[in-house]
Image (tube, rainbow, N blue to C red):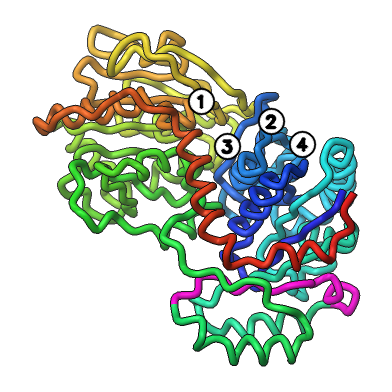
Amino acid sequence: MNALMVVGTTSHAGKSLIAAVLCRLLARRGLRVTPFKGQNMALNAYVTASGGEMGYAQAVQAWAAGIEPETLMNPILLKPQGDMTSQVIFNGQAVGCTQAADYYRDYFEPGWATIQRSLELLGERFDWVVCEGAGSPAEINLKHRDLTNMRLARHLQATTLLVADIDRGGVFAHIVGTLELLEPEERALIKGIVINKFRGQRSLLESGITWLEERTGIPVLGVIPWLEIQLPAEDSLDLFDRRPRSQRADLTIAVIRLRRIANFTDFDPLAAEPTVNLHYLYPHETLGAVDAVIIPGTKTTIPDLLELQTSGMAAQLQAYGAAGGTIMGICGGMQLLGTQICDRQGLEGQPGTYAGLGLLPLETTITATKLTRQRQGIAQAPIPGQPIQGYEIHQGQTQYHFNEDFCPLFVEEHLGIVNSRQTLWGSYLHGLFENGTWRRQWLNHLRQKRNLPPLTCDIQDYEYQRLAHLDGITDAIAPHLNLDRLLENCVCP
């Protein structure tokens, strides 16, 4: 395979964005291209058709390349769960938990072997690989055990782009400092620089670009303007850049920003709805006047439950639900809304049984076995008979106590629950809101409570909106990125 590598001067410089755009541009040229990130640390995950778990960012890049996501594209996924520990996922399957100090002792060698084998298998089917680094490639205290940046670039002899975020300031120092800290053979692979998130007039930057090119001998191949449109976020730090709609929206929906929030990409379809103002609230904040509250997934349900209780948010949610407010819990969020959560083995801390928020008649037991699979089903609310699809990622077994007021949300009883007034909802399905017709039906139920006219439900699922979104981002960036000059450094097959 020809290999392109995207590294950044800092975290959140725009590596995932540039990698996705490169995948899209190469695919438009009719090339067989795959994304790759050897090791990712993220709580936003996707489940492949084979039931493997991978970073959501690499799934998005696969869709940008016009192919289906598979775990070979992200062979190592680390999911932080607090107390300096992470769950380790190799080739889509959880293999254990480890502390940071022990990870490289126990997993470095098998991790590097897994990365190399994944690249070999991808190379049998693709002509190009677009690799994404992690953080900075110049962390001198970590370089000797770095599985994701220049070790990979050197292994592939990849044509490498260095991306820097000018919006945070100090862009020239970041670029020069990064290059200075690379080994000569690593620096030789850097064939271009991209300055990202530029808000000003390009003419005012030219003198700096000229100096930078003369100082480093590396061309600046792109100055990417600040874009309001965004890719799905890699981790919760990206939520700092998310702002509520400035214009007036019909509905306001709050998502509780749990400390270990996971898979908040579930709510991108809601954020894309022009009539919805979606915003994230910390547990210590006040709910205020909202039309619905969503409790998202979490990597560690019990610690987040305890924080909801100590912060006062649990009491707010209970009062809001008792008053007829609409609350939706997804995965761990549904578990939080139940009557109790039992962790006999202490998988999330101290063994014990903990009282939930008591809004849904269900009990969850945390288990060592992790369930990851894609699912299809039939919803029974808001309107019966609507086909849906999504995916499960959870380490809990839930027992539902259906009665005259609570019934299964889906024909498949173990996937969720809803009350008769359709104000209290719980579902194990990630990606639920990507089902366009179901999403609009759910929003129309909220609109009916406000005496607002219904939205049309004859719309495509979010996957088509996502592809259009990727095309829009690619079209916005392509004129500012000299792809042909970058590809001159690659030997075409």
Task: For marks 3 and 4, give the one nearer the viewer.
Answer: 4
Q: Which residue is mark 1?
A: 390
In-front residue for pair 146/467: 467
Circles 2 and 4, Cβ within 8 Å, touching? The answer is: yes
**Quadrant position of residue 48:** top right
Q: Which residue is mark 4?
A: 91
Circles 3 and 4, Cβ within 8 Å, touching? The answer is: no
Circles 4 and 1, Cβ within 8 Å, touching? The answer is: no
Q: Specify which label sits upstream in the sequence, 3 or 4.
A: 4
Residue 287, given in percent of the width and then of the height, sits at 22, 48
Q: Taking 30 as reference, is 452 left or right?
A: left
Q: Which residue is mark 3?
A: 346
Neighbours of disc 4 within 10 Å: few (<14), some (14-19), many (20+): many
In-front residue for pair 98/392: 392
Q: Specify which label sits upstream in the sequence, 3 or 2.
A: 2
Q: Which residues are magenta?
A: 183-199
Q: Taking 6 as reference, is 249 left or right?
A: left
Please state which amino acid type lies under the numbered disc 4.
Asn
Please state which amino acid type lies under the numbered disc 1.
Gly
Q: Specify which label sits upstream in the sequence, 4 or 1.
A: 4
Residue 36, given in percent of the width and then of the height, sits at 74, 48
Q: Which mark is residue 246?
A: none
Q: Taking 421 as reference, is 37 left or right?
A: right
Q: Specify which label sits upstream in the sequence, 1 or 3.
A: 3
Q: Which mark is residue 52?
A: 2
- Mark 2 and mark 4: Cα distance apart in space: 7 Å
Neighbours of disc 3 within 10 Å: few (<14), some (14-19), many (20+): some
In-front residue for pair 464/427: 464
Please state which amino acid type lies under the numbered disc 3.
Gly
- Mark 1 and mark 3: Cα distance apart in space: 29 Å
In the picture as drawn, the residue positioned furthest to the left comes out as: 451
